[in-house]
Amino acid sequence: ELISIQDVEYYGLIEAGTPKQRFKVLLDTGSSILWLTGGYTNTPQSIPSLNTSTQGPNFVVSKSSSFKLSDKPFSITYGDSSFAKGMLATDSISQESMTVSDQGFAVINQTSSSVFTGDASGIMGMSFEKKDSSLPTPFWIRAGIDVFSFAIARLSTPNSNFAVDSPGGILTLGGVNQTLYTGDINFVPVRKKYYWEILIDIVIVNGNQIKKTEKDHAIIDTGTSLIGAPTKITDSIYSHIPGAVPGNNTYEGYYFLPCDSQVDFSIAFGGKSYSLAHQDFIIDQASWNENLCRGVIFATSATNDDSDTWVIGDSFLRNVYTVFNSTDPASVGFAAPASNYQALLGSQSKEPKSNPPKHTKHSSAFKNQPFTLGKKILNSYVFFGIMSSHLFLIQ
């Protein structure tokens, strides 16, 4: 069962160490590393004491008989200059019924402020292993999980208290939950096993087709709250929404539109179009004008107009049942939610698992392009996981 923090972040539970210690972690298909905040002893004097901003409990490594600390410092810096630092280590990690006895991960003892909105203790990266890095192999790969599926819930009545946990949906490891979707799963080939990255067919806003390049592609990222699009595409989208105006200063890259707007937005993958619910297109009210609200789509880079990369986050994923399939050929699948989808997500705590779904064989000649953005956080909305190699430092 997933935990929702105001439709902004979605957490799962993992256990670390011997005996097991339980933690909430942000489940992030946009990154591959697992890290937990924690302290340790007998480290070089250059490693500072615990100084983190996270609200969740820390991993007490001294209580784990199976913990092994490496001699490799770990540092990650995101696109907004927020960071996490610590050391690489191994220990027993469990998620649901899956356990890896010597899983590599990072123990973090320094973070910048406001890393999470809620009380998570770390991040569980669920993207592909980066072949050219010295980072640990992701947990889901070590555990032999070829397929996993997300059903992400939408809050019916948001609460202003971000500390309140709400039912956030269901993560199925090893297959799909057939009670949560209807019809066939539409599998779209992954361009390269680097991100869960797929090609975009077409984008339509209020009946208008948005001009894009043939190479426009999307990273399907559960660690991002909103939807990021190339700057020119973002401008074009909002040009078809009456009353939309661009933000400035801290809101650069965002647009604001009348709060009563009913925007018809759809995006097609693999020959099939998917619509965004009206309530998912508008996210929060402008502090300076009660009649204006922020739109869900933001520009991924205000300085790189030539980008062709989208980041598709939770605001879209609440509208589909999503399957991540790593078996060759790797693919991301979308299915229509069951008619009572939100009720099921609020009531089911354990899901029946099935065999991995069948999918059509695909091929792709496109090469993966590096992406240069990291975590973007603004008024509690997060953009985790997507980063370039020069932002990801193993020292």
Image (cartoon, rainbow, N blue to C red):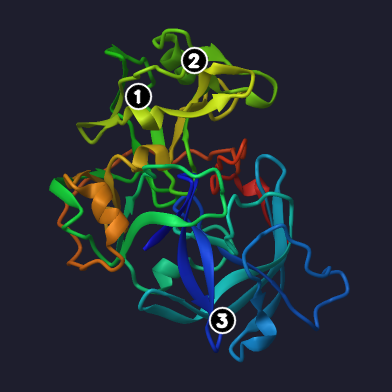
For image coordinates 65% across by 87% down, the residue present is 63
Distance from Cα at disc 1 to Cα at disc 2? 18 Å
For image coordinates 78% across by 63% down, the residue present is 51
Residue that lies at the very extreme toward the right in this rendered image: 45
Q: Position of residue 279 (x, y in %)?
A: 37, 30
Label 2 sits on residue:
235
Pointers 2 and 3 in contact (C-beta within 8 Å): no
Location of residue 233 (image quadrant): top left
Distance from Cα at disc 2 to Cα at disc 3? 47 Å
Q: Earlier in the sequence, mark 3 or mark 1?
A: 3
Mark 3 packing: few (<14 Cα in 10 Å), some, or many (20+)?
Answer: many
Q: Amino acid at mark 1?
A: Glu
Distance from Cα at disc 3 to Cα at disc 1? 44 Å
Q: Position of residue 393 (x, y in %)?
A: 69, 55
Label 3 sits on residue:
91
Question: In the drawing, does residue 328 fall left or right of residue 74?
Answer: left
Where the C terminus falls, by quadrant? bottom right
Q: Is residue 301 above or below residue 18?
A: above
Label 1 sits on residue:
214
Q: Amino acid at mark 2?
A: Asp
For image coordinates 69% across by 86% down, the residue present is 62
Q: Is residue 209 above or below residue 127?
A: above
Mark 2 packing: few (<14 Cα in 10 Å), some, or many (20+)?
Answer: many
